[in-house]
């Protein structure tokens, strides 16, 4: 029989309480809620157990289920009659953003998520705006950066057509605030003055907005990309670490097959795909209630199944969306509002899962720095520490000038490397690699972290053998 008496103040936890909670696992990370740090302030008073379940995102689609599983696990113990669970949330920062090469303007931004599409006309910006707005309504601090420099539409969708950029101190730009969002970009042009820029100039602008905007404290920064897989997309993925990308498509085959190409581009540069959004999935007739798949159906589902990537949402086609966007008012209520709210919960949960997963990944560097003598010191998250000589790194450069990209044969000969070569500086490449600048002027090699670990292990083995 369970003890129903209550003592004054906290007492020792019932036998097996923490072990019971370790049986409850986050469905995205596949790890228990205790090791993930979700369980905070676990105390007992008699046969009553209390704790805070601190989730990594607001509006979590898994929060209620996790709380119910925790309660059930604790009530199964002999000495527990009641369980009080307070639910809270705190968004974790993507560890890769802690790099010294992350622009100072992003110092208080926790996660960056790209919203992309393979082709234009699929409603990518509409999804980005309403997704960001739904996240803000859920309580998150949210910014949105429109880097579709050739056809920016985010400002109009947020009622900011007549706004211009405001400069702060030392050339820092101040984002415009609207509907609870911090907004940047799209204020450089009007319909009478379109931008005609080559790719490199547009890419420089993207880097400027990443490094020269006073974003302040943000839980999520959403980046609305132009369609396709051009210079701007590559610039973004190499300039800052992304928590992930969301791919927007429509149901017809031509749209989702092109979307696959954009998706694979992100996979190639090691950006996690949070999921697919199928926009304009169907038209819901308000008169008879019939759902008509105007643009055919199943495209998002087919892409999701083929690529083993979650389908985050199916957004219906509705005239209210166009009316709201033309009026500069994101959608909060009704069927469309509910669809975007559900999408926001999924997107934030998966983005935060990426951040937590990276923090728990021993194969990623915790710290990387150029040390005395021009070598590179790497401290890995599994506790390993390596100092890799510059000569070793230069000889293992993976760029096309040093290694034949088809045969894999080394083109760089040992005699071509100066004996006194050093690493002058390093720069993060997204969240998956580092670029090194050598004293001989070479700087085109991108060392993925897995490759860097292998080089470091080999260098350590060689040094041990010499000793």
Image (cartoon, rainbow, N blue to C red):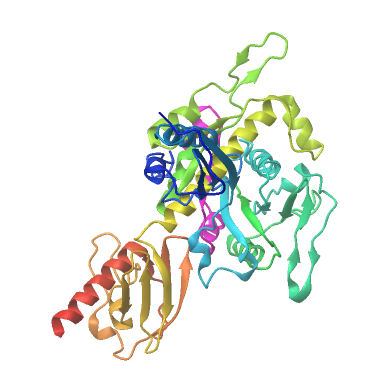
- How many numbered circles does the render carry? 0
Of 146 and 191, the residue lying toward us: 146
Q: Vertical placement of 467 versus 298: above or below?
A: below
Q: Residue at x 32, y 62 (%)?
A: 450
Q: Residue placed farthest to the bottom in the image?
A: 420
Of 234 and 93, the residue lying toward us: 93
Q: Residue at x 64, y 20 (%)?
A: 283
Q: Residue placed farthest to the top in the image?
A: 288
Of 61 and 286, the residue lying toward us: 61
> In the displayed structure, does residue 89 sit left or right of residue 217?
left
Of 327 and 337, the residue lying toward us: 337
Task: List x then y, in percent, for residue 4.
Answer: 50, 33
Q: Vertical placement of 448 versus 2: above or below?
A: below
Q: Vertical placement of 204 versus 11: above or below?
A: below
Quarter the N terminus occupies? top left
For the record, the magenta segment spans: 229-257
Task: List x then y, in percent, for residue 289.
Answer: 66, 11
Task: List x then y, in percent, for residue 202.
Answer: 63, 61
Q: Can residue 189 be seen here?
A: no
Residue 71 belongs to the span the image colors magenta: no
> In the displayed structure, does residue 109 sit left or right of residue 80?
right
Q: Residue at x 37, y 78 (%)?
A: 377
Q: Can residue 423 be seen here?
A: yes
Quarter the C terminus occupies? bottom left
> In the displayed structure, does residue 213 sit left or right of residue 351?
right
Q: Residue placed farthest to the right in the image?
A: 162
């Amino acid at each position: 029989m369970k003890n129903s008496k209550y003592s004054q103040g906290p007492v020792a936890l019932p036998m097996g309480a923490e072990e019971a909670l370790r049986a409850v696992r986050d469905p995205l990370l596949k790890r228990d809620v205790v090791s993930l740090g979700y369980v905070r302030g676990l105390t007992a008073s008699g046969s009553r157990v209390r704790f805070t379940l601190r989730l990594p995102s607001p509006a979590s689609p898994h929060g209620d289920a996790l709380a119910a599983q925790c309660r059930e696990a604790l009530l199964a113990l002999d000495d527990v009659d009641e369980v009080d669970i307070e639910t809270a949330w705190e968004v974790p920062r993507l560890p890769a953003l802690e790099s010294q090469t992350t622009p100072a303007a992003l110092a208080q931004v926790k996660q960056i998520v790209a919203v992309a599409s393979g082709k234009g006309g699929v409603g990518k910006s509409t999804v980005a705006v309403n997704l960001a707005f739904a996240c803000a309504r859920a309580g998150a601090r949210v910014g949105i950066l429109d880097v579709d420099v050739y056809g920016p539409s985010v400002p109009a969708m947020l009622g900011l057509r007549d706004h211009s950029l405001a400069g702060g101190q030392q050339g820092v730009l101040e984002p415009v605030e609207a509907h609870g969002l911090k907004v940047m970009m799209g204020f450089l042009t009007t319909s009478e003055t379109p931008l005609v820029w080559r790719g490199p100039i547009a890419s420089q602008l993207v880097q400027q907005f990443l490094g020269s905007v006073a974003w302040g404290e943000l839980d999520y920064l959403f980046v609305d990309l132009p369609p396709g897989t051009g210079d701007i997309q590559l610039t973004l993925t190499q300039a800052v670490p992304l928590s992930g990308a969301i791919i927007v498509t429509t149901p017809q085959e031509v749209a989702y097959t092109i979307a696959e190409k954009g998706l694979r581009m992100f996979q190639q540069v090691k950006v996690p795909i949070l999921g697919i959004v199928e926009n304009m999935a169907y038209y819901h007739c308000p008169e008879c209630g019939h759902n008509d798949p105007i643009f055919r159906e199943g495209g998002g589902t087919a892409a999701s199944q083929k690529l083993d990537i979650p389908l985050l949402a199916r957004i219906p086609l509705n005239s209210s969306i166009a009316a709201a966007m033309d009026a500069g008012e994101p959608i909060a209520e009704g069927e469309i509002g509910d669809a975007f709210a559900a999408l926001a919960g999924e997107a934030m949960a998966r983005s935060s899962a990426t951040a937590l997963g990276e923090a728990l990944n021993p194969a990623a560097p915790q710290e990387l720095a150029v040390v005395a003598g021009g070598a590179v010191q790497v401290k890995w998250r599994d506790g390993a520490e390596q100092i890799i000589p510059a000569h070793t790194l230069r000889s293992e450069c993976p760029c096309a000038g040093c290694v034949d990209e088809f045969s894999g044969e080394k083109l760089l000969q040992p005699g071509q490397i100066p004996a006194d070569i050093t690493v002058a500086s390093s720069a993060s490449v997204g969240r998956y690699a580092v670029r090194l600048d050598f004293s001989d002027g070479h700087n085109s090699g991108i060392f993925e972290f897995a490759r860097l670990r292998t080089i470091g292990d080999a260098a350590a083995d060689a040094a041990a053998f010499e000793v």
